Structures are given as C-alpha cells and as structure tokens.
Amino acid sequence: MEKFFAAFRNMFTVPDLRKRILFTLGLLAVYRLGAHITAPGVDRDQLRLVWEKVGTTLLGVLDLFSGGNFQTISVFALGVTPYITATIITQLMTTVFPQLKRLQEEGEAGRQKLNQYNRYLTVVLCMFQTFIVARWLQANAVLPVSPIINVPVLSTFLDYYILSTIITLTTGTIFVMWLGEQITERGIGNGVSLLIFAGIIIGLPSRGVPQVLSRLKSGDTFAVVGVIAMLAILLGLIAFIVFVESARRKVPISYAKRHVGRQLVGGQQTHMPIKLNMGGVIPVIFASSVLAIPQTVLQFIAYDPTVQDWRFRVHSFFTDFHGGDPYYELVYLSLIVLFTFFYITIIFNVEEVSDNLRKHGGFIPGIRPGRNTAEFLNTILTRLTTVGAIYLAFVAFVPQLMLSGFNVGRLPFFGGRIEEFVTGTPGLGWIPHGMGYQFYFGGTSLLILVGVAMDTAQQIEAQLVMRNYEGFFGPGSRLRGRRT
C-alpha cells in the first residue's frame, strides 16, 4: 500500500503527467457541468413521470451511456452514443467498401480521414435521433407544440421546440465528441471511454448508496445480510473481470533472416497476444439494444385494453418479456454469444493477419505460412471466442439476477413447484423478483468501469516507468496481460 501511495505522489511529480491528469479532470468537470443545463422548453415534472414508465426500454440503455443526461434531457442528453454508433458503423463498413479498407491501411493519414468521416456521420445520426427524441417528448407532453407555420404537412418539421431541441442536443453532442478527442490527444486514457466512465461513477452514489444505507439502518437481519452478500458478489465479479480482461493467448511468431541491402535482418522471436475477450463490451451493448427495441416501439403504439386485437396481444406478451423473465434471459444470453462471434469475426480477419505475417517474413513455428496459418489462428480464435462469449453472458446475467431476479414461476413444467420452494425457503425469497433496488448497475456498467480503469492505469504506469519511476505495482511488476 505504501508503494501505491508513493506511485500516486509520483503521478503529480512528473510535470507532463501532472498536466495531462489535471487537463483530463478539468474536461470531465466541464462534461458534468453540462449535465445540469436542461434543454429549452422541457417540463421537468412531466419528464419525471414519463421516465418512470420507460426506464427499462432502449431509452434506459441510452441514459446509461449518457451518464444520466438523457433522463433530464440536458444539453448533453445523447452523450457520446451517436459517436460510438458512427464509429461502429464505419468499422463495419470497412469490410464492405474497399475504399474504406484502403484508408484503414494507410496509417495515420488514413486514420484521420476515417475519423473525419466518423464526425460527419455523427452529426447526421445525431440530427435524426434528436428529431425522434423531440417528437417523443412532444407526444408525452414534455415539450409544448408551437409550429412556426400552420401548414399541416410542414408544422411537424417546422416547430420551434423541435428545431431548438435538434440544434441544442446536436451541438451538445458535437461538443462532447470534441471533449473526448481532446482528452485522448492531450490527457490520459481514451476520452470517449472516460466520459462514459465518469457518467456511471457519478450516477451510482446518488442512486445506489442511499438505498443501501437505508437497508443497513433498517435493522432487518435479512436485509443487512442481503446487502453484504450483494457487495461481496460485486467485488468478486469485479475481480473476475480483471482476471479475464488481462488474459492473453500468446501465439509465438518467428521472423526468418533475410538480406536487406548489405545487412542481415530478422531472425527474432516474438509473440502475437490475442485477448480472451476481444469483443469487449460491444456484444452486450448490441444484445441489450436489440431486446430493448420492441419495448421502445410499443411506446408509440396505442391500444385499447377492451379490444383483444394483435396490438393488445403484443403488449400483453412484452409486459412480461423483460429482465428476470426466463424466456427473455434465454434470448438475451443467446444474442450475447451470437454478437460476440459476429463482432470478433469483423475485427479480427485471420486471412489478413496470415497474409501480413507472410509478407513480412513471419511464421508460427511448426505451421506452414498461408492457409495453414489462417486455419491455426481460426482454431485459436474460435476457442477463445467461445470462452469469451460464455464469460460475457455470465457477467451480464449475475448482476441482472441480483437486481431483477429470475421469475422461476414462468419456467415450463416444474416452474410453479420451484417458485413455491424458493419463496418458502429463508434467504431465497428474493430470487423471483430480485433484491428490490431501483438503480441499474449491470454487467455492461461493470465491464465499462473495469475496462476503462485498467486501460487508464496501464497508460499512467507506462508514463511513470518511462521516466524511471516505480509504477503502481513496484519495480518489475508492471500491469501486464496474463497468459492463458
């Protein structure tokens, strides 16, 4: 612990590192300041009532990544979500359009060009999303209706409050995107990830801590034991995430000796580190977003409870189809596995990696270059992806089980008997309905928090070691990936 505090002091001893850290903290403070500036025309009381109904839909996922800004419709309501979406779309499009693929391979100049495309696409996506948000706010009486011209066809588009919402939220998103880029270039860590990290961290004390303290003060033995068990499980889950996220499969690579002019180069031994969880948090986000789409769409479809038509049946089905429902969990976990394989196939092309190794004179010992190398890498990648997908599904399911529970009564055949058993057994009564907390702290949040914290710690560690200071873990104990 003494070495940790010494390393912490060293962070502010190095002038350049101190400047980067203070710059990052300053921009994060600006980001949080914008969370308290509400968009013009918003009725906060009505918005609070509406949010109680839509907190579990896709809007809740959007609010998670905006750091709670969407729940209050602040000027930073969309956060960095449009920028992340644009980046993912551009990354996927590189596999479809050869022009984008060539830009990706051109180094720094190509990367800057792709970033420029990301910015343009962010503005387009943001304008579309803010128009939908403004119409949704008007439909729920959160925004007043004030058309600029009273023409039925144009009044929807030429409405004062819709235009002001589009301009305000789009400008706020562009500013947040600029903050993230400035943190990445002149601060410490990945700017976009740190903005999401800050939003989650700041939202937890105001939402979760009061509920936990009220249960500890209640004097109920089961409530106190439940809080202690929940905290122990969360700490164990965080340790498990750190353990897996640092895991690497090191594939040995050898480079043959060759003559370049009059010099003999090559002949070195190295390795290719492949992460156990290459997909990161993206598959969990995709799965959550896909399952939240029906709940979001149903907010715009009116139905009459007295008429049992298709709209009534659809609403009845999705009333129970949410977190904690066995069928929902089955689809949710299956989508996580599916998206994990899909996303990793996109970002790691074994044919391209094998071809690059062959061009640079590299080979895997005992494996012939070319197709055999690609097949060998594909076998390794399939095994790692399988374990990574199971890991992501587990991390996403455990917090949801604690918060939302698992409605065992909906299980086929023996669901009723299982429900009677768990509800009648002391200490297991929380399983069907969860622990009753009204804040969201799921696997997505845990993965983001741990991943960003590890990445930032690695960058600070590298800065300290580069200047001959001991890192957080003492000399010779740098934060490395663990070999699997």
Image (tube, grey):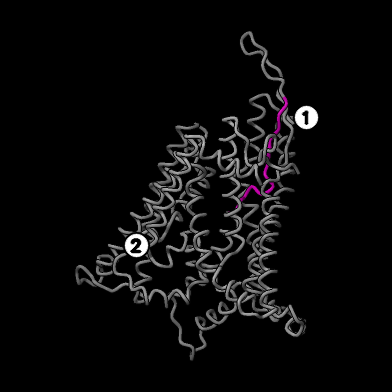
The circle on residue 289 is: none
- Compared to residue 88, the image places residue 322 above or below, namely below
Mark 1 is surrounded, within 10 Å at the Cα level, by few (under 14), some (14 to 19) or many (20 or more) other residues, namely: some
Q: In this view, does 146 lie to the left or right of 36?
A: left
Q: Name the residue under label 2.
A: 37
Q: Residue 327's quadrant in the figure?
A: bottom right
| Amino acid on which the number 1 mark rests in the picture | Pro
- x%, y% of residue 184? 47, 42
- x%, y% of residue 110? 46, 34
Q: Residue 428's quadrant in the figure?
A: bottom right
Residue farthest top in this picture: 262
| Amino acid on which the number 2 mark rests in the picture | Ile
Residue farthest left in this picture: 149
Q: Is residue 20 left or right of residue 36?
A: right
Residue ID at (61%, 53%)? 450
- Compared to residue 64, the image places residue 216 above or below, namely below
Residue 65 within the segment the image draws in magenta: no
Residue 271 within the segment the image draws in magenta: yes
Residue farthest front in this picture: 2
- Compared to residue 238, the image places residue 24 above or below, namely above
Residue farthest bottom in this picture: 306
- Secondary structure type for disc 2: loop
What's the magenta region? 269-281
Mark 2 is surrounded, within 10 Å at the Cα level, by few (under 14), some (14 to 19) or many (20 or more) other residues, namely: some
- Compared to residue 261, the image places residue 302 above or below, namely below
Q: Which of 100 and 146 is in front in this view?
A: 146
Residue ID at (69%, 64%)? 233
Q: Name the residue under label 1.
A: 365
Residue ID at (69%, 52%)? 388
- x%, y% of residue 394? 69, 61
